[in-house]
């Protein structure tokens, strides 16, 4: 399988590691050769030791390796912009960036399914099939897959639903939660009695136009940070902006709905980190990020946690 070969090539054996000066040559030899035998091959090691984090990988398809880059830092949410052309869902930020190879199937459905298969291997010890999610450290953590429709919604959404069919068994166990956003038609989500996909409601109107929306239809609501709050001076929201944030958090959480703000300040870094910190401390559920490593605390710029 294509993704299996890619991941296998990315796995470094212990023999490639520098010898530990405090380890005897005999023990180092054992360590170097351990993975030549199946005894030390852990069945669900793909995401071993990765701690899930409520990070949303904004415009995930821009990553060097979409989905997998986010998975590697523990991001529990990814986003794919889809465009329907000739009965195929292509992925990209704009039409000029679309290619025949970069499809919703190739960049997201197949990799997610492969990861779930790796986390749920066949075993003679199982009494029933396992239903682990993508993270080995927390098999019950769902992966949020945001599908942002860029072409006309009522025509495009049925193709998305059809593309999701290989993951149907994973939806019943909540291993994957699909959120339709962009041009996703609410009517095609809300009208389904037993739904395994949901609608990304607008945060600002949860108490007005969308006051009838519940978490059963929209477990997550989002909005444009800049349009909602305006510009940020310094490293935190002013009193007026903070009051608005707290009101929106209270309204959403009162409905059992999680929140995500996109288009947050990206620069200066001090402003970006300050806003991340404030949103998290005020109860915003997902931190929408472009810099995965910084958000995960894996770079010098990410020591805000």
Image (tube, rainbow, N blue to C red):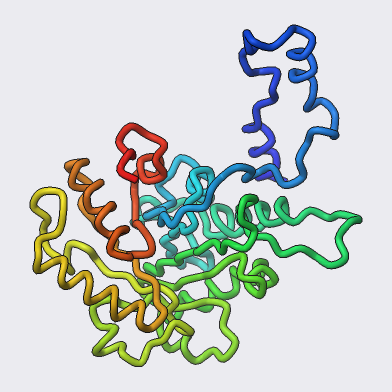
Q: In the rendering, at what x and y percent does residue 67 appear?
A: 51, 50
| Image quarter of residue 39 | top right
Q: Nearer the viewer, residue 253 or 260?
A: 253
Q: Nearer the viewer, residue 89 or 120?
A: 120
Residue 283 position, x and y percent, is: 32, 65
Position of residue 75 in the picture relative to residue 133 (left or right): left
In the image, residue 185 sits, relative to residue 139, either above or below, namely below
**Residue drawn at x 53%, y 48% as measured from the top left:** 51
Rendering coords of residue 180 (x, y %): 44, 73
Q: Residue furthest front?
A: 22
Q: On screen, 252 above or below 267?
A: below
Q: Residue at x 50, y 49 (%)?
A: 74
Q: Nearer the viewer, residue 184 or 30?
A: 30
Relative to residue 82, is residue 135 drawn left or right? right
Residue sitting at x 66%, y 71%: 173
Rendering quarter of residue 23: top right
Looking at the rendered image, the quarter that the C terminus falls into is: top left
Expressed as whole percent of the image width and height from the top left, the position of residue 177 reads 54, 69
How many labels sit on residues?
Answer: 0
Q: Is residue 85 toward the left or the right of residue 211 in the image? A: right
């Amino acid at each position: 399988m294509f993704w299996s070969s890619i991941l296998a090539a990315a796995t470094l054996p212990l023999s490639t590691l520098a010898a530990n000066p405090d380890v005897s040559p005999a023990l180092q030899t054992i360590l170097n050769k351990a993975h030549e035998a199946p005894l030390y091959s852990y069945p669900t090691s793909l995401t071993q030791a990765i701690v899930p984090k409520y990070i949303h990988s904004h415009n995930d398809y821009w990553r060097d390796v979409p989905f997998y880059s986010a998975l590697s830092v523990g991001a529990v949410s990814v986003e794919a912009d889809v465009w329907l052309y000739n009965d195929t869902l292509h992925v990209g930020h704009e039409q000029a960036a679309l290619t025949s190879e970069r499809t919703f199937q190739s960049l997201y459905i197949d990799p997610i399914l492969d990861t779930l298969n790796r986390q749920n291997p066949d075993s003679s010890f199982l009494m029933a099939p396992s239903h682990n999610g993508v993270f080995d450290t927390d098999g019950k953590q769902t992966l949020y897959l945001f599908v942002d429709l860029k072409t006309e919604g009522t025509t495009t959404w049925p193709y998305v639903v059809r593309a999701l069919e290989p993951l149907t068994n994973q939806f019943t166990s909540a291993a994957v939660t699909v959120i339709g956003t962009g041009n996703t038609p609410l009517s095609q989500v809300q009208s389904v009695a037993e739904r395994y996909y949901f609608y990304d409601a607008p945060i600002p109107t949860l108490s007005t136009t969308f006051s009838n929306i519940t978490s059963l239809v929209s477990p997550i609501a989002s909005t444009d940070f800049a349009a909602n709050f305006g510009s940020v001076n310094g490293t935190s929201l002013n009193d007026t902006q903070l009051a608005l944030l707290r009101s929106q958090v209270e309204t959403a959480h009162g409905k059992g709905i999680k929140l995500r703000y996109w288009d947050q300040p990206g620069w200066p870094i001090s402003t970006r980190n300050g806003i991340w910190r404030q949103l998290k401390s005020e109860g915003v559920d997902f931190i929408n990020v472009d810099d995965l490593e910084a958000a995960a605390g894996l770079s010098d710029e990410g020591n805000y946690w």
